[in-house]
Amino acid sequence: MKRIRISGLTLGLLAAAGMTHGQPASTAQLIAAGQQSDPALSSAAEEVVQDFVVRDKRGRLVKDLKAGEVKVADDGAEHRVTALRLVDGAEAGQRIGLVTLVFERLGNAARRVARDAAESLVKGEQAQNVQFAVVAVDSQLFVLQEFTTDKEALKRAIGRVTNGQYATYAVESERIKKSLKETVASADGAPAQKKTAQVMLDMLQFNSSYGREEATRMSIFSLLSLVRGQYSMAGRKSIVYFSEGMEVPTHLDEPFRSIPSAANRGNVAIYTVDARGVQTSSQNAGSEDLAKAAKLTGDATTATSGAVSKDELQASDLAENSMRKNIQLPLQTLAESTGAFLMSDSNDLSKPMRQVSEEAASYYEAVYHPGIGSYDGRFRKTQVEVARKDTVVHARLGYFSLPVTARGPALMPFEFALTKALGMNPMPKDVEFRSAALVVRPGPTEAKGLVVVEVPMSGIKFTEHLDTKTFSSRVSLLALVKDAKGEVVAKVSSDLPRRGPLALLPQARAGNYIYKEPLNLPPGRYTLETAVMDHEAGTVGTRKSSYVVTPKAQGVAMSSLYLVRNFQANAKDLDPNEPLQYQGGRITATLGGQVLAVKGAQMSTFFVVYPDPAIAEKPVAEAEFSVDGKVIAKSALPLPAPDAQGRIAYVLSSPAESMPPATYLIHVIVKQGNSTADGMAQVQIAAR
């Protein structure tokens, strides 16, 4: 076994050189499965705490219910309520209530409706324990105001988020996040203030790569991030989500269903607002036309029997499409399934906003034992009824049945199966993939790195649909990073359903699915456990590797060596903080470690040098190529000057077609003054 070592702050993978592969794990998504008590399901007694609100026929809150008047059904079975408490007044004052105002991308008219509604909410009478925050969902998740009771500060933030000046979000959001980090790190801060600051930071730990494909994906995973960030705060939390509707495509059904499940586990109510205001008939025409077409086709085929006809299939498809074109329906689902309500078809939302304020400060908590016999990941429906006439109950509608060790605020059903696979002995190896933890930038107290997973699609099953001349496949990933105690300190997952025309199937099979995400860790010893599922084949592969993070000493530092799969020159929208970039282009790293010796092929590696500004001498670098432990070539590397961020990005290329087939160890050594940093990578040159 060899250790791939980078001096300074090191992620040394204790695995065979060239066999280190992995899946991205973002610090943003550090979810310690089983590390803390689940506020909705306690691991010891398996108690469920179901919060709900009851109103009478005049819309007033009912505050005098007794335990005997409340019935709770869980998965179709009624369960005795062991405790019922009203969180109100003095009881509520002992808890901090959080209300997060979330503004989706909005048009001019919708921004006016949203602004008026939000201002009416924050300027009204509020319980002393309720704090508000303002965030925006645009190209990523931005914070415009951290949790506060300052009404003027909230009004200013609402004004900023509804004035259409999206370009100002990033600077303000980064300033607020920096302030929040300072609050958390302060030795003098009040515990409650530090707690809400940490919750706000957790809510913003969002994997922005989710949102590059489509607006709905961005919306779904933003909401999941906001929900999971509040998971550690006791009591009922509220999200008020302003949007112009949501159309959920089929491949995002599962992540979408995970939002209410995650919210219900974390006691988060999602109030949704269709900010389009009063709707005209033309605005609803799209879904109505599809619905009418489905009905006409269905009426024409109701007399048939036996085999399903083509018309009947088309009627079914049209009916589903009409539902998906109803962009208000997902908002209604989110609200009603989390014990909240949808606000729509009105330009004056001041009255329902008063109800939101009331419910943030006054609600019931019913405790019961669900008696779960098998944690099979199945969705368990819940229902709350009260034995009092003329009342309306707003309660959560269910959660996924998961064991204590697999629970998390945003755990999705496919993650349950992958978590189970990681716990099997022996671990399944039926899907081929590679995974690795790689260094981006060493540091004295924290390593900035990447977790990368690479799945060769040639080993994934593609189902061919000859009737539609399309293909489909689905790959899911899960990575857990565990510390020396075996506790999970980071969790990341990704789900990739694919569908395309049969003509592109050879191209899809020839590609690799590469997923990467940032991971920042303090010094210590860690284990990376990764699982990949091929849904079409019903198979799972797992992998486990260890690595060490060591603190960086004074002097020059260096990233890992990345094997280059592709280089996109003049990349658009290139983030200045993107680690894998070179001269304005984007590097796609690969963990394959093999290059075919064909005409024009290049063996390329990429790395970044971080000079020490305190050392007067410029850094110098040298590359060594070894085969079977013998150095066969050396070459000095002309390092350019550092960029504006103090980085020296470098691509080392050699013509693979002129290299004899063998396994090469590339060793790059960088020196500056008396300090040294080095890195290694292994590449196999193979004959065609």
Image (cartoon, rainbow, N blue to C red):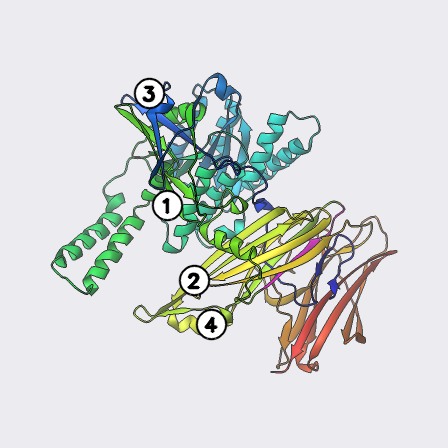
In this view, the residue in front, 537 or 519, is: 537
Query: Callout 4, which amino acid?
Result: Gln
The C terminus appears in which quarter of the rendering?
A: bottom right
**Residue 264, percent from left and from top:** 43, 38
Disc 2 is placed on an element classified as: strand
Query: Callout 3, which amino acid?
Result: Arg
Tags 1 and 3 touching, CB below 8 Å: no
In this view, the residue in front, 310 or 126, is: 310
Please name the residue that numbered disc 4 is placed on.
507
Please name the residue that numbered disc 2 is placed on.
498
Please name the residue that numbered disc 3 is placed on.
60
Left of 384 or right of it: where is 476? Answer: right
Disc 4 is placed on an element classified as: helix
Instruction: Say which label, 2 or 1, has the lower sequence index.
Output: 1
* Separation of residues labelled 2 and 4 (CA atoms): 13 Å
Query: Callout 2, which amino acid?
Result: Arg
* Separation of residues labelled 1 and 3 (CA atoms): 31 Å
Q: Nearer the viewer, mark 1 or mark 3?
A: 3
